[in-house]
Image (cartoon, rainbow, N blue to C red):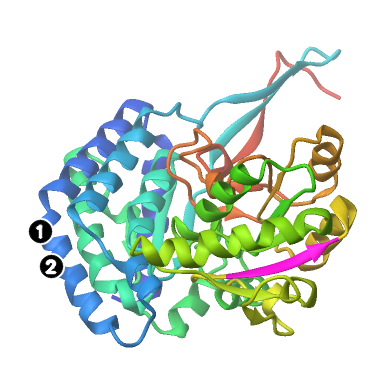
């Protein structure tokens, strides 16, 4: 089926989705979660084929991003159930005012219509995106990367079965069969068919969508995230936060890519950081972190000299840029110059420094004494997320159900004229 034919089917189904009541949508989501578990073996078989085809062409970190397991599929199913348990945003009155004329104006949340998602090699995005779009009353068009296409197709087959069991149109969920750039371009320019396009992936994909799309786009994902260790930081806490932010899952967008250290503690802290992320991890049988050091850091510890682009790179790997700064003001200035506006953290016991950081750093999520890895829809209580928006208009940060709705004004009168 061509991409245009899929879009036509999705557009034809959006009316039924917008009219579906909360109970029907929730029943569909629960049936989708059940179908996902029932089709687990078929999904794992498809995923194994994807992994075998990708092995040798992508890094081990990216293979982990692609891989599914019974536990990950169970997590995907639970994510769908979590969305079913969330309040339905559709129809919510966001603002109500009665005017002197007697008219009553209600700003009311309504579905987007058709939401298209272009994403890369994370098969779990398939179920997360479908669940959120459908609960928000919209049809959903998915266009995954070629590395995960078999996995995505098996997942979508199961989810469609769940939709049908609940009496909603299976055409409300579509997976683009063409994984070439041509299909991505079709979605970017599908005016009249796509009401919102959300790219999830690397900087190249997101930039291509932002630059070339003629349909509305929400910019998501790229994460050059920073952790600043202040001169008054609890250093043990800072080490825990940095290891978690860098190593718990380095291939995701909320992983830390740059550590900034106050010069007043650099001589004491950097040797601890090097030991924690290199020797200690190696001794525990874990992957060590390559430290890319600026000149000041190189004078204190050994590592790889930082290259010209290392503080502007989303490594998505066991690599960490390290820079020594002269206090919180220089840390804030560095982040302003190099961040992608995703997530940044300060570790400090100094409330004044923390307040300056929280107020002046212009990113979607800013932390005080916590890991950047918390920037996630589930961790923020939104259920599974559609993505992390790094722009400022319409949606910012983790995009849950409310961010997938638009609104319209509903006005009630008793014959008023103007």
Q: Nearer the viewer, residue 412 or 95?
A: 95
- The residue at 64%/62% (across/down) is 271
Residue at the far bottom in the pictured view: 56
Which range of residues does the magenta coloring cover?
A: 320-325
The residue at which mark 2 appears reads as: 45
Q: Quadrant of the C terminus?
A: top right
Cα–Cα span, label 2 and label 1: 6 Å
Q: Nearer the viewer, residue 24 or 248?
A: 248
Is residue 144 depicted above or below 238 in this figure?
below
Residue 408, x across and y down, in percent: 65, 36
Say which mark, if any, is on residue 41: 1
Residue 318, x across and y down, in percent: 49, 70
- Mark 2: few/some/many CA within 10 Å (<14, 14-19, 20+): some
Left or right? Give the position of 240 relative to 51: right
For label 1, the SS is helix
Is residue 42 depicted above or below 3 in this figure?
above
Residue 234, x across and y down, in percent: 67, 41
Q: Is residue 251 visible?
A: no
- Mark 1: few/some/many CA within 10 Å (<14, 14-19, 20+): some
Left or right? Give the position of 158 relative to 277: left
Asked whether the residues under the numbered discs 2 and 1 touch, taking CB atoms below 8 Å apart as contact, a structural biologist would say yes
């Amino acid at each position: 089926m061509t991409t245009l034919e899929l879009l036509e089917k999705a557009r034809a189904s959006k009316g039924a989705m917008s009219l579906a009541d909360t109970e029907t949508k929730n029943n569909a989501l629960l049936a989708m979660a059940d179908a996902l578990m029932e089709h687990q073996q078929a999904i794992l078989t498809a995923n194994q084929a994807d992994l075998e085809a990708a092995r040798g062409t992508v890094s081990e970190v990216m293979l982990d991003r692609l891989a599914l397991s019974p536990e990950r599929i169970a997590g995907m199913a639970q994510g769908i159930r979590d969305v079913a348990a969330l309040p339905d945003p559709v129809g919510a009155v966001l603002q109500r005012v009665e005017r002197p004329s007697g008219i009553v104006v209600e700003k009311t949340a309504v579905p987007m219509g058709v939401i298209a998602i272009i994403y890369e090699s994370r098969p779990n995005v398939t179920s997360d995106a479908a669940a959120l779009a459908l609960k928000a009353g919209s049809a959903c068009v998915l266009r995954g990367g070629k590395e995960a296409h078999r996995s995505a197709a098996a997942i979508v087959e199961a989810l469609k079965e769940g939709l049908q069991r609940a009496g909603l149109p299976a055409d409300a969920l579509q997976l683009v069969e063409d994984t070439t750039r041509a299909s991505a371009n079709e979605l970017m320019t599908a005016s009249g068919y796509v009401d919102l396009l959300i790219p999830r992936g690397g900087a190249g994909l997101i930039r291509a969508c932002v630059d070339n799309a003629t349909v509305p786009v929400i910019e998501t994902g790229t994460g050059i995230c920073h952790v600043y260790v202040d001169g008054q930081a609890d250093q043990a806490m800072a080490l825990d936060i940095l290891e978690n932010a860098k190593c718990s899952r380095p291939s995701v967008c909320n992983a830390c890519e740059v550590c900034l250290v106050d010069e007043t503690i650099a001589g004491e802290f950097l040797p601890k950081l090097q030991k924690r992320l290199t020797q200690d991890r190696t001794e525990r049988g874990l992957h060590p972190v390559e430290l890319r050091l600026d000149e000041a850091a190189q004078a204190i510890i050994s590592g790889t000299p930082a290259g010209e682009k290392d503080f502007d790179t989303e490594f998505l790997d066991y690599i960490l840029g390290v820079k020594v700064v002269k206090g919180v003001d220089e840390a804030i200035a560095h982040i302003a110059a190099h961040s992608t506006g995703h997530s940044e953290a300060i570790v400090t016991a100094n409330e004044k420094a923390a307040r300056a950081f929280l107020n002046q750093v212009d990113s979607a999520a800013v932390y005080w004494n916590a890991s950047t890895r918390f920037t996630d829809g589930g961790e923020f209580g939104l259920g599974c997320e559609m993505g992390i928006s790094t722009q400022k208009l319409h949606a910012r940060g983790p995009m849950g159900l409310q961010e997938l709705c638009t609104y319209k004004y509903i006005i009630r009168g008793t014959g008023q004229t103007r």
